[in-house]
Image (cartoon, helix red, strand yellow):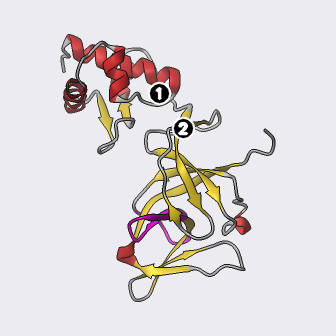
């Protein structure tokens, strides 16, 4: 579908920004990059480009825009490879702790993620028997449906997150199982648990 001049400027800016930095720009960065005065105008152009199939975005997330492969092919480029993922906070590997938003990013030269992939830093030792230690970084793929036994990020009772193995139990209960023989599992009703992602990688830094 044909693009207006401004829509082409927006999608070109997005493609160039993602190619350089590995993640999508914020609406504020788009506005500044192509000299638009209004964030609402950026939102309008993004919505139009999404409707025309040139990009897709995560719900209510300004940094989760992906360029369509068909558009990249038009420009003679392959799919955009993410060189960094957002560092959103620290995740409990002991008792659950409140999730925090962070404006940082991690570089992963050996991984090729997408806008649904993010990183968390582990705090605690409840997953140590799975070789996930305090201070490790975990790479998480967003998911709301997982298999029993997978290591997941779980939101507990709407305000606390934890990294545990996920199991469905009888009576509509969920068991969040630590990998540490000295710690007890977290057993909660299924409606009180929201799975936010599954573990896909662990990264450990040994030296500064």
Up/down of 82 relative to 34, above or below: below
> In the picture provided, is 198 more to the left or to the right than 8?
right
Give the residue pinned by disc 2: 104
**Whole-percent x, y for residue 50 in the image:** 24, 32
Quadrant of the image occupied by residue 157: bottom left
Is residue 193 covered in magenta?
A: no
Q: Earlier in the sequence, mark 1 or mark 2?
A: 1
Report the residue at 65% width, 36% height from top.
110
The quarter of the image holding the C terminus is top right
**In the rendered image of this protein, does residue 57 appear above or below residue 197?**
above
Task: Tell me what residue is drawn at x 42 percent, y 30 percent.
Answer: 24
Residue 18 drawn at (x, y percent): 45, 25
Task: Find residue 148 and report its horizontal and vertical position in percent.
Answer: 51, 72
Classify 10 Å Cα crowding around label 1: few (below 14), some (14-19), many (20 and above): many
Residue at left offset 33%, top offset 42%: 58
Q: Residues within 10 Å of mark 2 (few under 14, many from 20)?
A: few
Toward the bottom, the furthest residue is: 171
Picture residue at 31% right of the left edge, 35% below the top: 56
> Is disc 1 in contact with disc 2, using a CB cutoff of under 8 Å?
no
Residue to which mark 1 is pinned: 80
* Count of marks, rendered view: 2
Left or right, 180 with reference to 100:
right
Q: What stretch is highlighted in magenta?
A: 145-162
């Amino acid at each position: 579908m044909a693009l207006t001049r401004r829509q082409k400027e927006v999608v070109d800016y997005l493609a160039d920004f993602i190619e350089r930095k590995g993640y999508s720009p914020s609406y504020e960065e788009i506005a500044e990059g192509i000299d638009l005065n209004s964030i609402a105008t950026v939102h309008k152009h993004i919505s139009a480009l999404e409707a025309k199939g040139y990009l897709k975005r995560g719900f209510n997330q300004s940094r989760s825009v992906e360029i369509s492969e068909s558009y990249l092919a038009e420009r003679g480029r392959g799919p955009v490879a993410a060189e960094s993922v957002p560092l959103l906070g620290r995740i409990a590997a002991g008792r659950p702790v409140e999730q925090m938003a962070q404006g940082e990013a991690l570089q992963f030269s050996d991984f090729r993620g997408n806008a649904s992939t993010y990183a968390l830093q582990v705090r605690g030792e409840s997953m140590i028997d799975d070789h996930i230690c305090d201070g490790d970084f975990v790479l998480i793929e967003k998911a709301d449906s997982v298999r029993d036994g997978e290591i997941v990020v779980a939101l507990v009772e709407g305000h606390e997150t934890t990294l545990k193995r996920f199991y469905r139990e009888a009576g509509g209960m969920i068991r969040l199982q630590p990998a540490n023989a000295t710690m007890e599992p977290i057993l909660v009703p299924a409606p009180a648990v929201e799975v936010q992602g599954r573990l896909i990688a662990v990264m450990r830094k040994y030296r500064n």
